[in-house]
Amino acid sequence: MTSLADVVAYWRFEDGTGLATDETGQFDGELTSFYTSNGDAGPEGWSTNVMGALIPLSGAQNTGSIRFGGASAFVDISNSQDMLLGSSFTIEFLVNPDDPGGGVPVFGLSPINRLYTTLGWDAGQLIWWTQFQDQFSSAPADLVQIGEWQHVAFVVEPTEYTIYVNRQIQFNGGIPAGGEGPFNFPGSNTTGDRTIGDGFRGYLDEVRISDAALTPDQFLIVPEPTAISLLVLGGLTAWFSNGWKKRRRNFQ
């Protein structure tokens, strides 16, 4: 088993309130400008719509997500703590998108350095647009299913990045010249410097940032496992119980 990296931040959206607790305790967020704290009754807010009742890697209960209605609502994760990602890291999340139209942001990190990702249509094709510093890169997003839950991972290395959808490679290519890291974001209390879902449409859940370029066997989710995969997952869960917490920060 490949050793896992430290978790830089991990928002599970289990709070059921206007808060978005970071499991590391470093980057607790708030649901900003949401119409309601109950996304099951209104267009935005905390929701019980989830991909599954358990997170396969950890076995943790999964009861909540955030529903976004495409307005100005977002999860603000800006604070005085430096967020140090370096040149190799992974941002993964669960997503159940509504029709994104011309483009909806999934996450955005600043100041000084910049890292933003948007999902949208372009000439009839679903596309990821990612801003690396002041450079932009587009990648196909045809593996993404509208109105369904899926796991997405952006794996960034010093000169290239890979996008996975349900552990399948969607794209692998170079980071545009001038857009390379390191991606280190100094602490900022300015609302909106670090966001999740600023204007997104649909559901987001289990947003985790790790400080290394993870491989698919290290991702949070293994969607719709086969019987053989279930055996593997059982081993992962047992390994998690015995060793994972020793390798990562203590989230208790």
Image (cartoon, helix red, strand yellow):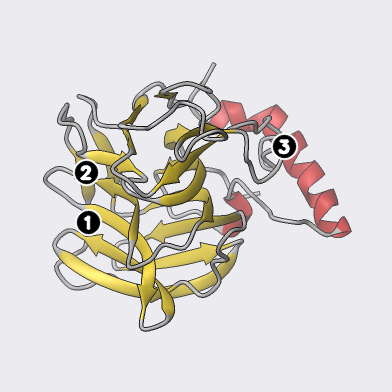
Q: Are marks 1 and 2 in contact (CB under 8 Å)?
A: yes
Going by the picture, which residue comes out furthest to the top?
252
Horizontal and vertical percent for residue 164?
Answer: 52, 64
Looking at the image, can residue 12 be seen? Answer: no
The vertical placement of 233 against 74, above or below, is below
Write the residue at 71% across / 29% down: 241
Instruction: Give the amino acid type for the residue marked by disc 1 in the picture.
Output: Gly
Is 222 or 157 nearer to us in this picture? 222
What residue did someone put label 3 on? Answer: 53
Horizontal and vertical percent for residue 57?
Answer: 67, 42
Res 162 → quadrant: bottom left
Write the residue at 43% across / 80% down: 125
Write the residue at 17% across / 67% down: 135
Going by the picture, which residue comes out furthest to the front?
42
Horizontal and vertical percent for residue 176?
Answer: 22, 73
Res 145 → quadrant: bottom right
Mark 3: give few (<14), some (14-19) or many (20+) Cα within 10 Å: few
Mark 2: give few (<14), some (14-19) or many (20+) Cα within 10 Å: some
Write the residue at 44% across / 38% down: 44
What residue did someone put label 2 on? Answer: 184
Q: CA distance from mark 3 to mark 1?
A: 36 Å
Compare marks 2 and 3 and give the one earlier in the sequence: 3
Q: Which mark is residue 181?
A: 1
